[in-house]
Amino acid sequence: MNDEHPEVKFGKTGILLINLGTPDSTSWWDIRKYLKEFLSDRRVIEVNPILWQIILNLFILTFRPSKTAHAYKKIWKKDTNESPLLHFTRSQALKLNEKIGNEKIIVDFAMRYGNPSIKYKLNKLKEDGCENIIVLPLYPQYAAATTATVCDEVYRSLMKMRWQPSLQIIPHYESEPLYIDSIVRSIENKIKEINWKPDLIIASYHGIPKSYFDKGDPYHCYCHKTTRLVKENFNKVEIKTTFQSRFGPQQWLTPYTDKTLEELPGKGVKNLLVICPGFASDCVETLEEINIQGRESFMEKGGVNFDLIPCLNDSQDHIKLLEKLVVKYL
C-alpha cells in the first residue's frame, strides 16, 4: 500500500455563524428557489409531506414569489445588491474574526436556506484545516423550526464526510446577560434619539403555529423569558410581547403583532416603539413587515409616532456578545 497520503491541512478551529437565509436577488426565480427550499423543510411545515408538496408547487410557488419579491425590493441594499440579512451576517463574521481570529481560528458564516450554504461552508472550513468546528445558530430563542433545522443540516453535511471534524453547537441564549444588556441599551439609545415619549414598546418575535407549541416546542416560553428579563432591567416604559409573520390558515402564537398594531391607537396608545429581539439582524421581517407595513397600519388607525429599534446587527455590543458565546467553546 502506498504510504504517500494526500496532503491534509489540520490543527485549526472553525467558527460558523448561521442565520436563516436570503434569496440571491429580488428576481421571481431566485425568490421562488429560496421559498421552495425554505418551505420544503419538514421542521418548518409539519403537515403531510405529499399533500404539502402539491399545495406548495401548484399554488404557493406560483403566487407567493411575486408578493415576496415586492417586499424584498423595498429593503434590498442597492449599493451592494444584496439583502440586509446577508450584509449584516457577513459583517458579524468579519468583525468577530478581527477580534478572535488568528492562524488557528477561522470565523465564517453560512445560511440555512440559500447561499452561502451550510454544506459549502463546512466543507470549506474542513479543507482549510479545521479539525474542530463550533456552530453558532443566530437564534437567541430555541425553536425546532430554527435552531433544530440548522443542527439537522449540519449533521446531514457531516454524514457525507469521510473524515469528520469534531463538532460543538452553541445553544440558545435568550437569557444571556450580555444579550439582555444589549437589548436594553438599544432601547435606551433609540429613546435618546427620538423627540417624543413612547406610550408602549412592542417586543415582536417571529411566530410559530400553536400546534408546535402544543407538541412541546419551548420557543414561546423563551420569548416571554427574554421580555421578562428586559423588563427587569428597563422599567421606564411598558413592554408587551407579540408574535409576527404568521403564514397559512391555522392558529399561531398570540397576540398577533399586526392585529395589535391596528388595535393600539383605539386604546389610546399613539406613540409606539417596536423591537424585534428574536432577530440577530435586520431583515425582510423587521424592515418591511414591521417598519413599512406595521407602521402604515398603526398610523392609519390613528397613531401619531412610530419607530423601529434596529436589531443588534453588527454593533459593538453584538460582536461582544457573539465573542462571549463562542470563547467558552474554544
Image: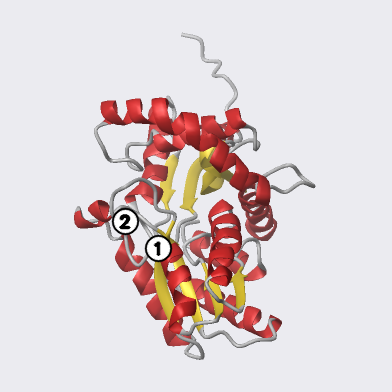
Residue extending furthest toward the left: 215
Q: What residue type is labelled 1?
A: Phe
322 or 78, nearer to the observer: 78
Q: What residue type is labelled 2?
A: Trp
The answer to whether residue 273 of the structure is visible from this angle is yes
Secondary structure state at the residue bearing disc 1: strand
The image shows residue 228 at horizontal and vertical percentages of 38, 79
Mark 2–mark 1 CB contact (< 8 Å)? yes
Question: At 49% from the left edge and 55% from the top edge, which residue is drawn?
Answer: 138
The image quadrant that residue 69 belongs to is: top right
Question: Which residue corresponds to mark 1?
Answer: 243
The image shows residue 165 at horizontal and vertical percentages of 45, 37
Relative to residue 92, is residue 200 depicted above or below? below
Relative to residue 110, is residue 139 depicted above or below? below
Between the residue at mark 2 and the residue at mark 1, the CA separation in whole angstroms equals: 8 Å
Which disc, if any, is residue 252? Answer: 2
Which disc, if any, is residue 62? Answer: none
Number of dots carrying numbers: 2
The image shows residue 206 at horizontal and vertical percentages of 43, 58
Question: At 32% from the left edge and 37% from the top edge, which residue is drawn?
Answer: 42
Question: At 60% from the left edge and 71% from the top edge, which residue is drawn?
Answer: 309
The earlier-in-sequence mark between 2 and 1 is: 1
Label 2: few (<14), some (14–19) or many (≥20) C-alpha neighbours in 10 Å:
many
Residue extending furthest toward the bottom: 236
The answer to whether residue 323 of the structure is visible from this angle is no
Relative to residue 278, is residue 43 depicted above or below? above
The image shows residue 322 at horizontal and vertical percentages of 55, 62
61 or 176, nearer to the observer: 61
